[in-house]
Image (cartoon, rainbow, N blue to C red):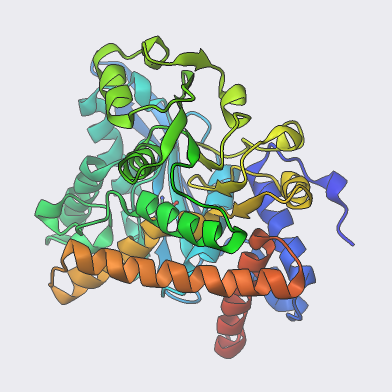
Amino acid sequence: MIDRSLYDEQKPLDMHNLQFDIAAQHLQVEPWILEKIKAPRREFSVRFPLRLDNGTIVHLSGYRVQHNTLRGPGKGGIRYHPQVDLDEVRALAGWMTWKCAVVDIPFGGAKGGVTCDPGAMSLAEKERLTRRYIWEISPIIGPEQDIPAPDVNTDPQVMAWVVDTYSVFKGHTCNSVVTGKPLSIGGSLGRLKATSQGCVYVMAEAAAATGLDLAGCRVVVQGLGNVGYHAAEILHDAGAVIVGLSNVQGGLYNPKGLDPRKVQAHFLATDDLLSYPEAQAISNQELLELPCEVLIPAALEGQIGLGNAQRIQARIIVEGANGPTSPFADDILYDRGIFVVPDILANAGGVTVSYFEWVQNLQKLFWTEEDVNKKLRDILVRSFKEVHDIARKEKINMRTAAYMLAIGRVAEAKRVRGIFP
Ligand code: GLU
């Protein structure tokens, strides 16, 4: 039996480990294999100086954790955020391992991060930070070793600096070292919106599985970063009513619907989301508890826990973010009949199209956006069905089912590879 009192739902690594242990209980995997694949394989910490625009020099901590490389190179984004620490990066790297295994793409899992406040940095400072951090981790990344990508507060421009810095390190242009690049240097069509598009594909599957009619349904999106913004935009264009939107400043509510483009334009012009005129300003907590059919948490970890799971009104939760719901909340939501599409499936569209980008780079080929989206949809619909079948058969929630599928695949890779020497 798992002693749940040992786990703190505010700590991403505790959540990762508890999610793993819950699923492992349902599997017949050799204990030594479970022990091997639960913990990170390799962890790299760096500390480096950054010259600010005003001439001051500050020192920053950065990390790259390669959680698992049994099924292929490490894969996962780079995050710039004040909350970044080694334990968070460990959890995020682990979630990448299970994500890549759920959708069955030939990658392990990795993640990187720098503890910093990108909101307070100029573009030039962000570039210097990126170049120095990438220089520091260059010995352990590479197209066959570990392939970074965007995550919270990093974008295609940051990925372009990654390509440039790594290429200087190697002495020749090497664009397959990173995904989520601009199109002009080997990015893939469809990558920018891939995570959001993937959320929309699995949301349709979840609606079909639960008998929910998506026509005119009310959607709440937490977070207006790459994932949240594009999910809101795609759903708004498809006729959903976006009743709630938020960013770090707080939330907006309008039961008649919000136009994400207008909200974003207002924010970019004023830097003040909450002064948007056609909505009521609410807190992030209120946003999560709004009446709606679909809730898409697309911000950070630890949003739905013991404190609010009882008050969530959505019928379906599609986790655009990594780790937004604790396993304690999972139990409450499951008992209340709320259908959760877990992060490692719901937001796997991003890394799936990252995989397509890497394949195109290695083959020096370019696919059309239609091709990318069709292949993406095929993979996500197939994965959803595989996970949903396990959930129904075992009478467990979708998260535990997804972990069972993923752990089973990674465990099998370990079993056949054996141990060295
Ligand atoms: N940062 C994204 C994630 O958490 C994408 C990772 C990738 O494309 O490698 O899934």
Q: Position of residue 300 (x, y in %)?
A: 52, 37
Residue 327 is left or right of residue 112, and the answer is right
Q: Who is closer to the viewer here, 244 or 134?
A: 244
**Residue 233 found in image quarter:** top left
Residue 363 is left or right of residue 286, and the answer is left
Judged from this view, the residue extending furthest toward the bottom is 416
Q: Is residue 67 visible?
A: no
Q: Who is closer to the viewer here, 6 or 219?
A: 219
Q: Check the image and report above or below for 11 versus 405.
A: above
**Residue 357 found in image quarter:** bottom left
Q: Which residue: 24% across, 33% down?
A: 128
Q: Position of residue 328 (x, y in %)?
A: 77, 46
Q: Who is closer to the viewer here, 274 or 95?
A: 274
Q: Which residue: 22% across, 52% down?
A: 181
Quadrant holding the C terminus: bottom right
Ligand 1 - quadrant of the structure image:
bottom left
Q: Position of residue 109 (x, y in %)?
A: 48, 62
**Residue 418 found in image quarter:** bottom right
Q: Which residue: 54% across, 16% down?
A: 282
Quadrant holding the N terminus: bottom right
Q: Position of residue 80 (x, y in %)?
A: 40, 36
Q: Is residue 112 visible?
A: yes
- The count of marks equals 0
Residue 347 is left or right of residue 388, and the answer is left
Q: Which residue: 75% across, 73% down?
A: 394
